[in-house]
Image (spheres, rainbow, N blue to C red):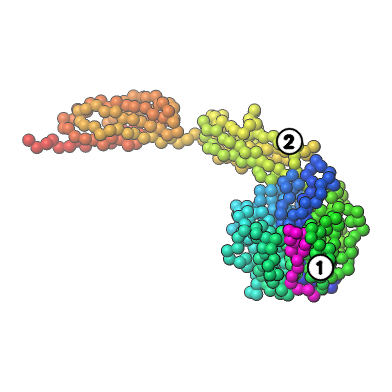
C-alpha cells in the first residue's frame, strides 16, 4: 500500500495522514527446514501465515513511533499470524483469528486503536491497515472497516450487502476488495479515477492500493493498473504484462514493485531511490515484499530482511537482532516497519468444559501454539497446584476438590524454550443444592396410599418424610428416588385429598409435614 505524499522528501506530513498499500508475497518454510529449501508461495496482502510460521512481531522506527512499535504487554505471549502497518498504528491478527491494534489513534497521542465492538467474538481471516482507517475480512466473507470518515467518501463506508470477499486493501482514501469469483469492488473517495475498475476485469487474485491508484494481479500472472498517473505509477514495466511472469505486487505512494517469476524484484514509478534495487538483494530469492509512502521492504528465502528508501535515518534501518531470525512476513509503515518472526507463542489457550461438582467429569482441551513446538504436555491444577497423575484430557471430580478452582495447563517446548498457557479457572467445586419433589396419586379417606420422593442429581443417602407432624421413618435413596406407604386415614368422611408437593433436601433431614388435608362434608342423608 502507499500514502499520498505532500512533500518531496523527508517525513510525511502529519495531516492528511499518509497511506500505505501492502502485499505479502510468500509463505516461508516451516521451522525444521532451511528457509531456502522452499520456493516462494504467493499470498495476498492480508492472508495469515500458517501457525507453524507464526509467532512474535518485531517493529522499529524513530522514538516518536514507540506507541506503534511496542506490542502491548497484554499480548506479549500471543501468537500473531499477520501484521499490517498503517499511518501510525499497527494492525495484527492473532492465532485464534482475533484482530488487535495499537499505536496512535488519530489524536497525535499514544492511544490504542479502537477495534469495533461488533468484532468481539468474530473470526477474521484477513486484515488491511490504511493511513487513517483499518479493515478486516471476516471468515464469513463480509468486510468491517473503521477509522477517519469524510463526507466525500472513505474506506469505512463499506457498500451495503457486500459479501463473498476474500481479500482487502486500503489506499489513502479508497478501498479495494476481491470477491470469491475473482471480480473487484471499490469504494471510498473518487480521486484520480481510483474507483474506476477497468470494464470486464475478472480473474483477480491479489490487489494493492496506493495513494490514488490500484494494482491487480490476475490468475494469469499479469498486472492491471488504474487510477491517477501523475508520476508514472500506471506506466507498468513490460515484464508485468507477460503471462505467468508476476508472483506478487505491492503499491507505494506513487509507484509499485513486484516479484517476478525469476524471484527478483521489479520497481516502477516516481523516485529513483525507491526504484534502485539494493545490492544486498543481488542473487537472492525474494519471497515477500511490501511498500509504503517512501519505503520498500523485501524478505529473501534465507530470512534476510532488505529495506530501502533513500533516507539516512539509522532508526529506519533493519535491526541487527533480526540477523538469522526466522522472519516469515514483512510490513512497511509510514513511519515504522515490522516483521513477523516464527516463535513459540500461545495461539489458542486451553479450555475446560463441564460442571464443577463432585461426581462430575471435566474435559480439558489442550492449547495450541505457534512456531511448531517439539512437544506439548498437559496438566490439571486445583487452585494452581498440580493434581498428581492428572495429565489426561478428563478429570473426575471428588470431595478432595471441594472449594477449589480447577484449571488445565498446556506446556510447549522447543529445544530449551518453554511456553505455558492456562485455561480460565472454573468456579469453586461445590456440592449441588438438591431439590426434592413428592408425588402421590389422589387418595381417599380410610385408605392407604403411596408417596414417591425424588431428589435431584440422582442423590444418594436417606430422606425422612413426616405426616401431620409424625415421622414415617428414614428411607434410603436409590438413584435419587424412594417410596413411602401412607397408612390408612381415620377421618370418617370419604373424599379426595391433595398430596404434598415439597419436601426438605435429604442433606439436613428436617421434618417438613405436608399440608393437612381438609375433610369434605359428609353427604346429606
Q: How far across and down, in percent of the image, does residue 233 sit? A: 80, 70
Quarter holding the C terminus is top left
Disc 2 crowd rating (10 Å Cα; few below 14, some 14-19, many 20+) is: few
- Residue 109 vs 321, above or below: the answer is below
Could you classify mark 1 by the number of other residues whose Cα lies within 10 Å: few (under 14), some (14-19), or many (20 or more)?
A: some
The residue wearing badge 1 is 236
Depth check, front residue: 497 or 49: 49
Residue at disc 2, secondary structure: strand
Q: Which residue is mark 2?
A: 375
Q: Quadrant of the N terminus?
A: bottom right
Q: Which residue range is magenta in the image?
A: 215-230
Magenta stretch containing residue 30, yes or no? no
Q: Secondary structure at mark 1?
A: loop
* Percent of width and height locating residue 189: 68, 72
Q: Earlier in the sequence, mark 2 or mark 1?
A: 1
Residue 124 image offset from top left, x and y in percent: 65, 54
Name which quarter of the figure residue 380 lies in: top right
Above or below, comparing residue 157 to residue 42 in the picture = below
State how many labels appear. 2
Q: Residue at x 72, y 38 (%)?
A: 412
Q: Residue furthest front?
A: 243
Q: Along the horizontal axis of the image, is 340 left or right of 122?
A: right
Q: Please report the residue visible at 74 percent of the width from the left and 72 percent of the height from the top.
A: 227
- Residue at (37%, 24%) from the top-left corner? 475
Question: Is residue 324 something one can see in this rendering?
Answer: yes
Amino acid at each position: 500500500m502507499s500514502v499520498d505524499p505532500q512533500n518531496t522528501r523527508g517525513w510525511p506530513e502529519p495531516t492528511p495522514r499518509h497511506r500505505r498499500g501492502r502485499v505479502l508475497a510468500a509463505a516461508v518454510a516451516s521451522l525444521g527446514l532451511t528457509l531456502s529449501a522452499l520456493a516462494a508461495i504467493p499470498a495476498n496482502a492480508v492472508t495469515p501465515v500458517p501457525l507453524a510460521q507464526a509467532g512474535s512481531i518485531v517493529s522499529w522506527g524513530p522514538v516518536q513511533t514507540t506507541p506503534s512499535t511496542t506490542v502491548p504487554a497484554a499480548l506479549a505471549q500471543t501468537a500473531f499470524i499477520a501484521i499490517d502497518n498503517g499511518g501510525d498504528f499497527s494492525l495484527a491478527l492473532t492465532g485464534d483469528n482475533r484482530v488487535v491494534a495499537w499505536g496512535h489513534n488519530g489524536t497525535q497521542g499514544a492511544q490504542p486503536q479502537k477495534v469495533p465492538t461488533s468484532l468481539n467474538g468474530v473470526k477474521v481471516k484477513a486484515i488491511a491497515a490504511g493511513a487513517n482507517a483499518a479493515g478486516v475480512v471476516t471468515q464469513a466473507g463480509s468486510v468491517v472497516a473503521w477509522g477517519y470518515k469524510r463526507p466525500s467518501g472513505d474506506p469505512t463506508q463499506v457498500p451495503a450487502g457486500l459479501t463473498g470477499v476474500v481479500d482487502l486493501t486500503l489506499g489513502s482514501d479508497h478501498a479495494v476488495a476481491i470477491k470469491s469469483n475473482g471480480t473487484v469492488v471499490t469504494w471510498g473517495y473518487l480521486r484520480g479515477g481510483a474507483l474506476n475498475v477497468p470494464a470486464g476485469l475478472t480473474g483477480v487474485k491479489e490487489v494493492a492500493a496506493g495513494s490514488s491508484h490500484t494494482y491487480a494481479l490476475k490468475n494469469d500472472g499479469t498486472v492491471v493498473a488504474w487510477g491517477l498517473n501523475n508520476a508514472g505509477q500506471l506506466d507498468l514495466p513490460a515484464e508485468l504484462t507477460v503471462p505467468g511472469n508476476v508472483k506478487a505486487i505491492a503499491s507505494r505512494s506513487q509507484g509499485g514493485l513486484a516479484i517476478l517469476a525469476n524471484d527478483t524484484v521489479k520497481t516502477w514509478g516516481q523516485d529513483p531511490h525507491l526504484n534502485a534495487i539494493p545490492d544486498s538483494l543481488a542473487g537472492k530469492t525474494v519471497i515477500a515484499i511490501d511498500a509504503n509512502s517512501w519505503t520498500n521492504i523485501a524478505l529473501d528465502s534465507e530470512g534476510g530482511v532488505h529495506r530501502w528508501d533513500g533516507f539516512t535515518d539509522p532508526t529506519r534501518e533493519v535491526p541487527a537482532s533480526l540477523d538469522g531470525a526466522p522472519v516469515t512476513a514483512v510490513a512497511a509503515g509510514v513511519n515504522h516497519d515490522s516483521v513477523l518472526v516464527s516463535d513459540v507463542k500461545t495461539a489458542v489457550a486451553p479450555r475446560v468444559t463441564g460442571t464443577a461438582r463432585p461426581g462430575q467429569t471435566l474435559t480439558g482441551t489442550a492449547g495450541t501454539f505457534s512456531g511448531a513446538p517439539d512437544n506439548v504436555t498437559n496438566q490439571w491444577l486445583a487452585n494452581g497446584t498440580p493434581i498428581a497423575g492428572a495429565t489426561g484430557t478428563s478429570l473426575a471430580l471428588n470431595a478432595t476438590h471441594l472449594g477449589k478452582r480447577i484449571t488445565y495447563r498446556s506446556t510447549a517446548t522447543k529445544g530449551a524454550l518453554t511456553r505455558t498457557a492456562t485455561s480460565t479457572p472454573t468456579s469453586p467445586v461445590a456440592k449441588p443444592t438438591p431439590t426434592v419433589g413428592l408425588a402421590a396419586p389422589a387418595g381417599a379417606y380410610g385408605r392407604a396410599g403411596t408417596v414417591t420422593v425424588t431428589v435431584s442429581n440422582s442423590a444418594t443417602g436417606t430422606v425422612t418424610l413426616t405426616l401431620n407432624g409424625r415421622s414415617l421413618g428414614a428411607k434410603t435413596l436409590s438413584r435419587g428416588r424412594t417410596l413411602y406407604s401412607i397408612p390408612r386415614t381415620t377421618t370418617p368422611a370419604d373424599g379426595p385429598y391433595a398430596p404434598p408437593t415439597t419436601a426438605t433436601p435429604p442433606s439436613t433431614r428436617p421434618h417438613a409435614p405436608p399440608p393437612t388435608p381438609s375433610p369434605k362434608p359428609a353427604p346429606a342423608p
